[in-house]
């Protein structure tokens, strides 16, 4: 019984081993035979696209490779010791490597690749195995990885023209420009410090909706190290726009690039070039300004876009104060303004600051720009302007219906009573508001045309006059979901009405926000004040005979 | 003719500085508000003068306050609220005098004395002006003068537009008041009597020959004999 079993086992092993030995022996002969010719360095083939393909195989490399035992025909299955096609049309090296990579999948099946490292399956489908793994000198991946720095390992594939396909059908090149990466501020970082989830053993398969969706997602990786910048970005109009569904709004990589990230301290022009990708219409006015001219002359201290608008917490210029940007350089601005903008008998910089709170710097410093008053509807609790969508929600209307809802008399512009009604309506719905005014230039391009100090407006009566030139245009302003600004034209006299005293209670300009009704009260009081003595005197004159008579009577008595 | 020292020097200085200050403040205030109707001076100068005078009158108010508090004479401003009915009657009698008595030659029911200077109507209105309206006008003026410096206080009353509204209302009140005040000052035994008294300090009590105290009570508690027809302290 035992002998019988041993015999069966022997036969079984022999059945397995013999073909392998035969195959190996055959392979060894075959390899030797192939290398007889292909061991010649001069052996080449001219391809159809006129490229020269070397047919040389390094014998020792091949013998040490993981495929040595398979012999040449293990991969070059169309060639055998008996049959070597003489003419074989090959279009190009690329085409040839593609066709040879397909050969890999005969052994390395899709199922196996999916199981071991899923990314292979999608890469293999594109037929680029040889590009990463090499061909005749191929080693096992374990050997290949040994002693290889991580970045170099990643670059094995990513230095090649690889693409990632998106659900949208777009393709994203995942080629990493190695020389740019080495010059970048991130040169010393490992790839996996940004591309978390990846390692020399892990390469998850991911699918993204679109290139944009991917860049937005990858930007979040920057936040891990750049905490302060990310916090600033959180409060920016850009992130706000993204959150509201405007995918054109920039994320980190849109401004800073991806692998070629440069130091923003050394390359300050990123503060112009990156903004110009979207805001190129502002560039000519910036270049014409004294700031732009200084920058062009090479003044390192000259402000770029980011200097005033901030790099990360970029905010809407109409509904918030951009002056902080100006004051970064012009630190002594308030003090400097006290040379003429003062409140006697003291010279307090807080008086200048009171102006800065409601007048944008450019409203005075952009000579010739058109100005207007912008009333933003601020939530009293937060002090922040209510965005359009919140107002729409409270008023239960849509963007198209908003003006109709506010402009109840449908005359195309909002009057004081309508502002009051809006204030009351918002109040009844639980939101107490403050209509906060700000004077600003009407065109964003003009905002950048900042001139010299001598050109700035110093004429107080441009604002402080009942017919103030700068108070002719008044708008209700609100931030739209897409980051743009919604303006609703108001009537010129809205700020002179008793209806706006409460809504716009924190906005006041001496001389120009005077309440007309109070002028009437003044005149009536003045007339009254004069009329009382006149009437009294008149009665005294009329009654003087009475007094004379009485005096005479009293005298008579005596 | 008897003379009583009704207006001590600090009060006379305070009064005339205040009077002049008020008039100029009213005018510069109007200039700031109505540059399109008249142009006595530029906006800048109107603001400059208005601000300076505001502070001068603030200091002046302090002179008044300290004088009256330190000398305890502040009580002449305080109506006798412990006798409200008697006070109301006196006030009514005073109003009746201005509205009717003065026409028919009645004697002024009130006879000013250093410790009982004001008639009930004056007492109420001056107390209101000195204790409330002028301080409020000064405070709102300060708010408008530098809204940032007084930011928290400005927010407390709602906002700068509210401060302006109060300041304007009081400006309107004082404009009308000063006219009436000036007219009432001319109702002494001669039109200039009270005005001169406010310069010299002494009020002349004019006695008409043979004129005894008739129907009205005196109410000045043993002062000099009073025979003025309608003596009044403005």
Image (cartoon, coloured by chain):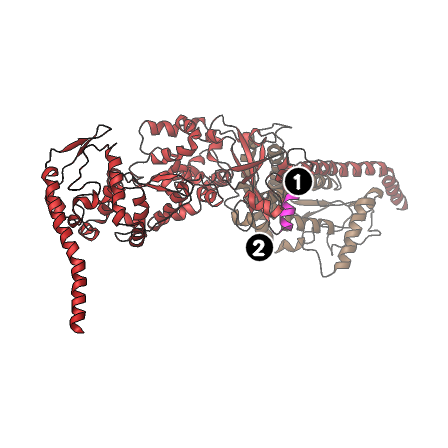
Chain colours: A red, B brown
Q: Which residue is mark 2?
A: B70
| Relative image position of residue A520 (x, y in whole percent) | 70, 36
Dominant secondary structure (helix, strand or loop) of the stretch shown in magenta: helix
What range of the chain is rendered magenta? A421-431
| Relative image position of residue B25 (x, y in whole percent) | 60, 37
Residue B5, above or below A472: below
Q: Which residue is mark 1?
A: A418
Quadrant the N terminus of chain A occupies: bottom left
For disc 2, the neighbor class at 10 Å (few under 14, some 14 to 19, many from 20) is few
Residue B208 part of the magenta segment: no
In what element is the residue under mark 2?
A: helix
- A101 vs B44, nearest the viewer: A101
The disc placed on residue A288 is none
Instruction: Please give the name of the residue rendered at 74% of the width and 56% of the height, measured from the top-left corner.
Output: B222
Instruction: Please give the name of the residue rendered at 14% of the width and 51% of the height, measured from the top-left corner.
Output: A24
For disc 1, the neighbor class at 10 Å (few under 14, some 14 to 19, many from 20) is many
- B213 vs A433, nearest the viewer: A433
Q: Chain of mark 1?
A: A
Q: Mark 2 and 1 residues: CB-CB less than 8 Å, in contact?
A: no
Dots 2 and 1 on the same chain = no
Residue A428 part of the magenta segment: yes
């Amino acid at each position: 019984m035992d002998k019988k079993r041993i015999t069966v086992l022997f036969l079984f092993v022999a059945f397995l081993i013999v073909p392998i030995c035969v195959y190996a022996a055959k392979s060894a002969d075959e390899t030797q035979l192939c290398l007889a010719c292909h061991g010649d360095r001069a052996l080449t083939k001219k391809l159809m696209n006129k490229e020269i393909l070397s047919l040389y195989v390094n014998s020792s490399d091949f013998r040490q490779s993981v495929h040595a035992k398979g012999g040449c025909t293990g991969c070059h299955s169309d060639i055998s010791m008996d049959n070597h096609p003489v003419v074989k049309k090959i279009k190009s090296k690329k085409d040839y490597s593609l066709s040879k990579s397909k050969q890999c999948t005969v052994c390395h099946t899709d199922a196996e690749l999916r199981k071991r490292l899923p990314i292979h399956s999608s890469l293999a489908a594109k037929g680029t195995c040889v590009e990463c793994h090499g061909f005749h000198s191929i080693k096992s991946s374990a050997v290949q990885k040994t002693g290889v720095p991580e970045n170099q390992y990643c670059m094995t594939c990513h230095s090649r023209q690889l693409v990632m396909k998106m659900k949208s059908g777009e393709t994203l090149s995942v080629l990493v420009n190695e020389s740019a990466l080495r010059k970048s501020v991130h040169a010393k970082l490992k790839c996996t410090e940004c591309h978390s989830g990846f390692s020399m053993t892990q390469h998850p398969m991911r699918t993204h909706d679109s290139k944009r969706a991917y860049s937005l997602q990858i930007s979040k990786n920057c936040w891990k190290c750049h905490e302060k910048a990310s916090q600033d970005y959180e409060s920016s109009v850009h992130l706000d726009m993204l959150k509201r569904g405007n995918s054109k709004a920039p994320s980190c990589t849109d401004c800073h690039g991806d692998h070629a990230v440069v130091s923003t301290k050394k390359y300050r022009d990123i503060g112009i070039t990156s903004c110009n990708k979207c805001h190129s219409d502002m560039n000519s006015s910036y270049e014409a300004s004294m700031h732009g001219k200084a920058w062009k002359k090479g003044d390192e201290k000259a402000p770029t876009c980011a200097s005033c608008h901030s790099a990360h917490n970029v905010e809407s210029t109409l509904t918030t104060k951009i002056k902080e940007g100006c004051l970064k350089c012009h630190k002594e601005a308030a003090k400097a303004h006290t040379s003429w903008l003062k409140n006697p008998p003291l010279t307090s910089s807080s008086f200048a600051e009171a102006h800065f709170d409601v007048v944008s710097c450019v409203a005075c410093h952009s000579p010739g720009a058109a100005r207007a008053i912008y009333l933003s509807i601020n939530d009293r609790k937060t002090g922040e302007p209510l965005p359009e969508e919140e107002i729409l929600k409270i008023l239960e209307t849509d963007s198209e219906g908003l003006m109709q809802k506010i402009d109840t008399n449908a005359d195309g512009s909002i009057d004081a009573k309508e502002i009051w009604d809006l204030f009351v309506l918002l109040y009844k719905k639980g939101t107490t508001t403050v209509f906060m005014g700000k004077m600003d230039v009407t065109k964003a391009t003009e905002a950048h045309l900042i001139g010299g100090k001598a050109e700035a407006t110093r004429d107080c009566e441009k604002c402080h006059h009942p017919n103030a030139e700068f108070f002719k245009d008044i708008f209700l302003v609100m931030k739209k979901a897409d980051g743009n600004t919604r303006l609703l034209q108001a009537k010129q006299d809205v700020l002179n009405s008793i209806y706006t005293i409460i809504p716009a209670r924190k906005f006041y300009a001496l001389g120009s926000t005077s309440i007309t009704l109070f002028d009437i009260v003044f005149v009536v009081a003045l007339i009254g004040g004069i009329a009382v003595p006149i009437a009294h005197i008149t009665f005294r004159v009329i009654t003087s005979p009475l007094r004379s008579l009485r005096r005479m009577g009293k005298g008579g008595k005596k | 003719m008897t003379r009583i020292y009704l207006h001590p020097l600090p009060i006379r200085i305070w009064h005339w500085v205040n009077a002049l200050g008020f008039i100029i403040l009213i005018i510069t205030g109007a200039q700031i508000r109505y540059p399109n109707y008249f142009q006595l001076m530029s906006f800048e100068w109107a603001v400059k003068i208005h601000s300076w005078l505001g502070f001068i009158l603030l200091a002046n108010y302090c002179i008044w306050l300290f004088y009256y508090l330190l000398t305890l004479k502040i009580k002449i401003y305080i109506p006798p609220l412990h006798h409200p009915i008697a006070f109301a009657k006196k006030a009514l009698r005073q109003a009746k005098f201005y509205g009717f008595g003065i026409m028919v030659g009645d004697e002024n029911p009130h006879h000013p004395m250093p410790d009982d200077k004001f008639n009930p109507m004056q007492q109420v209105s001056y107390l209101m002006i000195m204790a409330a309206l002028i301080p409020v006008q000064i405070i709102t003026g300060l708010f408008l003068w530098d809204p940032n410096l007084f930011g928290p206080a400005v927010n407390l009353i709602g906002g700068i537009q509210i401060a302006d509204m109060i300041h304007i209302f009081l400006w309107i009140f004082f404009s009308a008041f000063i006219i009436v005040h000036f007219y009432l000052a001319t109702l002494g035994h001669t039109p200039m009597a009270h005005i001169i008294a406010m310069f010299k300090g002494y009020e002349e009590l004019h006695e008409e020959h043979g004129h005894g105290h008739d129907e009205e009570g005196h109410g000045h508690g043993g002062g000099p004999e009073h025979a003025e027809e309608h003596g009044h302290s403005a």
